[in-house]
Image: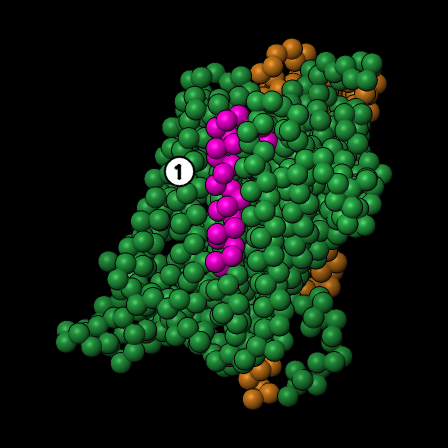
Amino acid sequence: MPTIVSDNTHYKDEFRRKNSKPLLWIAMVSIVMFFGGVTSAVIVSQGGGGFIAIPMPIEFTISTIVILVSSLVFHYGFIAIKKGNYNLAKMSVLITLILGLFFVLTQYLGWVSLHDNGFYLAGKESTQESSFLYLITGLHVVHLIGGLLSLIVVLIKTFKKKYNAEDTVGMQVSLTYWHFLGGLWIYLFFFLRYSIA
Amino acid sequence: MSTHQHHTKDFLFTYVFSTDHKMIAKQFLITGFLMGFVGLIMSTLFRLQLGWPGQSFEMIELFMGSWQEDGVMAPDKYLSLVTMHGTIMVFFLLTAGLSGTFSNLLIPLQIGARDMASGVLNMLSYWFFFISSVIMLCSLFVEGGAASAGWTIYPPLSALPQAIPGSGAGMTLWLISMSIFIMSSLIGSLNYIVTILNMRTKGMSMTRLPLTIWAFFLTAILGVLSFPVLLAAALLLVFDRSFGTSFYLSDIYIGGQVLDHTGGSPILFEHLFWFLGHPEVYIVLLPALGITSEVISSMTRKPIFGYRAMIGSMMAIAFLSFIVWGHHMFLTGMNPFLGSVFTFTTLLIAIPSAVKVFNYLTTLWKGNIKFTPATLFSIGLVSTFITGGVTGLILGNNALDINVHDTYFVIGHFHIVMGLSAIFGMFAGVYHWFPKLFGRMINNKLGSMHFWITIVSSYGVFFPMHFLGLAGVPRRYYTWSEFPMFENMIDINELISVFAIAAMIGQLIFFFNFVYSAFRGPKAPMNPWKANTLEWTSPVEHFHGNWYGEIPEVYRWPYDYSKVDKNGDFIYGEDFIPQTTPLGENEKDGGAH
């Protein structure tokens, strides 16, 4: 009897491998709906008329390039792990993390630029358009911080050689989420350019 | 046994931070019921004010303090009570309490899995729910009181503390609590979807799933798609309230002051809110419908009539629920043509609902019915769903709604479908799966008493409201004894309040029965209802992994009740054939077409 009972508790690893990616996919659907809600709010507010165009800071264009490059780098690292090349993988994940932090920096500089040009998040001088611009980019950064945390975990695990050709689920989860954040940024960037800029 | 040796050491992880779905189900149930009890007391209190306006109830002042100064309820506290009652009942009892309990209990057991896809996320889902409940209750005690703008918290009322005291700290805590609640719901839904898709046992195809699982699956999908939009709405409201943005606010002159906000629109909030709000009521209802399918089928010893039609209807309801939200906004000045589009989609949703009712009735017809409290509540759900559903047809018509919007007609409608149908589904589930939850049988006599008191008094509360609504009595009003045009309604209000008190007392019988039976009820056998689904093949005692040894394999659909052979005798000699019984020679799987 004891051995049969203890067998029942060894399913945790199998569950992790089988379920991590589907869980992430559904979570990403939720996040899409969240940004869908916020971007619909922009469209409905625009319908009320009177949106004054805000020039998009050049820093956001740099953000776009940075995040796209980081996705390529991370993916390259993933392919390296599958081939067993740990050193290349470590470098790739580290560079992705640095590029991710650089993305956050460019976002911050973009906000500074907006502020300097008289566009504010809130308050008497702010407009709906400016509030939305800060809010939408800010919410993306909040979700990106989750991505950065997952990158740190992946980096540590790569250093500890926890991944191998058979089991890269943890890295795949982080990679998929990182690509998702990049794709989401592309959508938001062009949406904001079209509706507010 | 190794698990028993660790029992006392791991008290915290066995009972508090458990990752076992059965324990988490019980946690959701208890917390949901406790919150529901708070909501029930709130409704009884404000019904005292509505039935006997301005009358002094000094006894209540003992409990309510300044909320009931000189024994009379303060008007702004009345508004807090109706707001909190709605919020607690819709979200904390009927969403988390209903979905959280039964999805957690039944999904792994009925699909044949050791546990949910992620035990840790499941545990977090419960604890976020618990924390959000605590914060919501804390909001009652802040200066200014709890949120008071109705459970729908429309700005500008909810955005401006100057507008009503509850829109100060109380509203802020409401928003924090709901944000955490939404996280809880999303994490839970993730788990349910992935578990159902990924973790079914051998032979358990999607068309061999019990209808409870289909219901929980579609509910979870609704949640994943709609709750994030409420989060967006709430976030924008937080910014308007606390940071001076103008998403929802514009051109406001209040208390002699012109506010800075320009450009916003409250209608934006309504769109975002109701985009969740409508799917939300189906999130509340679908699990109850799923539970009813299961209870009616096993208690009439007949296969559910139209299994695939039931799945199709639930899918249709789920899909359509996303394109009807405008029927909550008919009076916002929308273009009548747009109104007619929403009317069309709203009327469409009546069709799959009617299919389900028809199927319940045909399943019951000529069935060998075993009348347990679960059966009574399931049949009660069918009754109340018809009653509540038909008034939905009137409310869903953009022309007719002009007369009844924001009146007691609406309150009658949604209470009958949610406060009766959905809660009846929850009660049916609790009575039916009580042996699975607690390993003991709940008392049937007290259960029947609970049912009859509840259905009679609840109909007594909500049926007269339709007449009040048609006469024009507005909702959320503190009193209408001030209005001569409603003078002849006072007696109806008194009657409603009397029934409300009776209904409340009926629930006390249930709470007593529940607690007593959980500890002292007769021990339950493994399959007390002689039902087919997999949860009844799992031993009565709870342990991680649900089955000793291998997970059972499934060979047939779950509705082989009273299946007879060519001679008219029961196949295998019983009126039920569990899913784990292999198909006999020449025997066809009932679920296959």
The magenta stretch is B451-475
Q: Give the side of residue A117 with respect to residue B46, left or right.
A: right
Q: Give the side of residue A165 with respect to residue A111, left or right.
A: left
Q: How far across and down, in percent of the image, does residue B10 sit?
A: 73, 76
Q: Residue at x 65, y 10 (%)?
A: A50
Q: Give the side of residue A51 with respect to residue B423, left or right.
A: right
Q: Residue at x 58, y 33 (%)?
A: B490
Q: Is residue A11 visible?
A: no
Under tag 1, what secondary structure? helix
Mark 1 closeness class: few <14, some 14–19, many ≥20 residues within 10 Å: some
- Residue B249 in the image: above or below residue B61: above
Question: Magenta segment: does it hold B549?
Answer: no
Question: Magenta segment: does it hold B461?
Answer: yes
Of the chain colours in the picture, the one used for chain A is orange
Looking at the rendered structure, the kind of residue marked 1 is: Val
Residue beneath disc 1: B390
- In which quarter of the view is residue A114 placed? top right
Which residue occupies the extreme left position in the image?
Answer: B567
Q: How far across and down, in percent of the image, does residue B499 sit?
A: 56, 48
In the picture, which chain is green? B
Chain of the residue displaying label 1: B
Q: Residue at x 55, y 84 (%)?
A: A4
- In which quarter of the view is residue A46 placed? top right
